[in-house]
Image (tube, grey):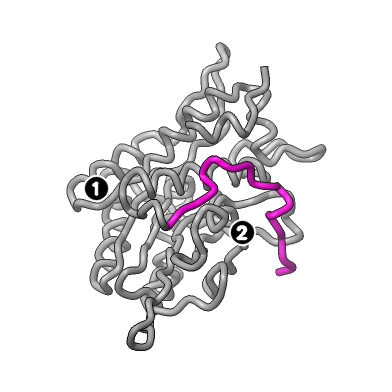
Amino acid sequence: MSVSRRTLTAAALAAVPLAVAATGPASAAPAPHGERRTRTLYIAGDSTAAQKYADAAPETGWGMALPFFLREDRLTVANHAVNGRSSKSFIDEGRLDVILAEIGPGDLLLIQFAHNDEKSADPTRYTEPWTTYQDYLRQYVDGARARGARPVLATPVERRKFDADGNAVPTHGDYPAAMRALAADEGVALLDIKALSLALWQKLGVEETKTYFNWTDTEQDNTHFNPPGAIAVARLVAGELLHRRVLAPRDVHRLEDEIPESWITWPTA
């Protein structure tokens, strides 16, 4: 039996990468005296979170849907996630430097990598879970903290993979465990999106999960999402931000509401 998305709620105003937040320009400057500066949540990550454009539709990054669950008068989203990047290549290309030049006190840096860190045949992206992966992640953590911002680690969202018995199986090896260990060592909030998404795919099952991933007439993509999938994963992220007390109840909304797929848009690049 199909599991409704309304049932799953019980368990973007899209931001342009490296440029603007979901509801306006990102800024780390303090507000004028007596005014509260809206905080910015920066996303550093890969294609599963990234902004997609018209030529990629219906592929959708979960970062495009995250603003639907955050109160825009309290938080804006600056989605810097980019297709194909690992924790290493994101830094090597200067993308973390761009974030650190903008981020300020009270802001958040949400970090999700592993999909491309796993590519052992590509030395420009590969990291080893218990050494270089942790070393690169630590640069995000230290950089955010040095600027008065709060780092938040998110284990990588799971791919769609099932065994012969219909059980959803993990695909990220030791990377989630390495991130959990680093979060514990550094005292960083951890969103276990790997575990939550795996449980969600298990609940949905082999056939229903196809309606959450970028399955089209010409493509069977078990890594990237369509609008329903991006919305579902963004809901997990927002819920974990609340559950881990990174955000307060006043910062979030619509966690149990149906989000229209029409809210997702793909601008022209």
Callout 2: 10 Å neighbours few (<14), some, many (20+)? Answer: many
The residue where tag 1 is placed is: 182
Marks 2/1: CA–CA distance: 30 Å
Q: Secondary structure at mark 2?
A: loop
Find the magenta span and give its range: 251-269
Tell which of 182 and 89 is nearer to you.
182
> Dominant secondary structure of the magenta stretch?
loop
Q: Judge left or right: residue 57 versus residue 124.
A: right
Residue lying furthest right: 217
Residue 178: give x, y in percent of width and height: 29, 42
Residue 59 % position (x, y)? 68, 49
Percent position of residue 80, x then y: 50, 65
Q: Which residue extends farthest left?
A: 185
Residue in the image at 27% along x and 58% along y: 138
Closer to the observer: label 2 or label 1?
Answer: 2
For label 2, the residue is 12
